[in-house]
Amino acid sequence: MDLLIPNTGLLFWMSLTFFVVLFILWKWGFPVITTMVRERKNYIDESLRKAEEANERLANIQKVSESILQEAREKQSLMLKEAAETRDAIVEKAQAKAREEGARMLEDAKAAIEQEKKAALADIRKQVAALSVEIAEKVLKQNLQGDQAQMDLIDRMLDDVTVNEK
């Protein structure tokens, strides 16, 4: 049982040592430990504050990027609309030009046909005039007395003209 009950001298020295160590720790150890704990707490608080600021900045950046993306989409839509309008204007302009060109070509063709028609009529008139002069010349050369003789001469001349045309 001696082992379980300490004697008073040992108890005195153990108590004295305990209080000396407690005093040393109280004087120099605990302030250092509490200072370190306080600094660690401040460091953790500062890190949390910086993390919150980073999260806020990230949220702001996301909002800005979304607004920039929306603006880019709007600009793209506007550009596509302008491109479609430009395309339509170019197509309309080309169609109008093609219509004008077609109308001009039609007018040119009509003018050419009219000119050919006038030239053909002029040529026919020349031929008729030449035939008339030829007929008159032949009629005058032959002194025809009767209507029947004149008609026979005209028929022969017409036969000559028909044969010459073929």
Image: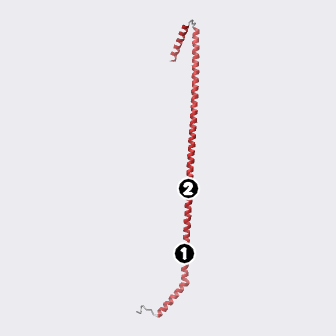
The amino acid type found where label 2 is placed reads Gln
Furthest-bottom residue in this view: 8
Furthest-left residue in this view: 1
Are discs 1 and 2 less than 8 Å apart at CB?
no
Across and down, in percent, residue 113 comes to 56, 27
Furthest-top residue in this view: 145
- Which residue is rendered at x = 49% and y = 91% of the image? 13
Mark 1 closeness class: few <14, some 14–19, many ≥20 residues within 10 Å: few
Across and down, in percent, residue 81 comes to 56, 48
The chosen color scheme is secondary structure
Is label 2 in a helix, a strand or a loop?
helix
In primary-sequence order, the first of circles 1 and 2 is: 1
- Which residue is rendered at x = 55% and y = 77% of the image? 38
- Which residue is rendered at x = 58% and y = 11% of the image? 137
Mark 2 closeness class: few <14, some 14–19, many ≥20 residues within 10 Å: few
Residue 29, located in which quarter of the rendered image? bottom right
Work out whether 77 lies above or below 60: above
Work out whether 89 lies above or below 152: below
Work out whether 104 lies above or below 161: below
Residue bearing the label numbered 1: 41
5 left or right, relative to 157: left
Q: Quadrant of the N terminus?
A: bottom left
Is label 1 in a helix, a strand or a loop?
helix
The amino acid type found where label 1 is placed reads Lys
Residue bearing the label numbered 2: 70
Across and down, in percent, residue 145 comes to 57, 6
- Which residue is rendered at x = 58% and y = 23% of the image? 119
Residue 147, located in which quarter of the rendered image? top right
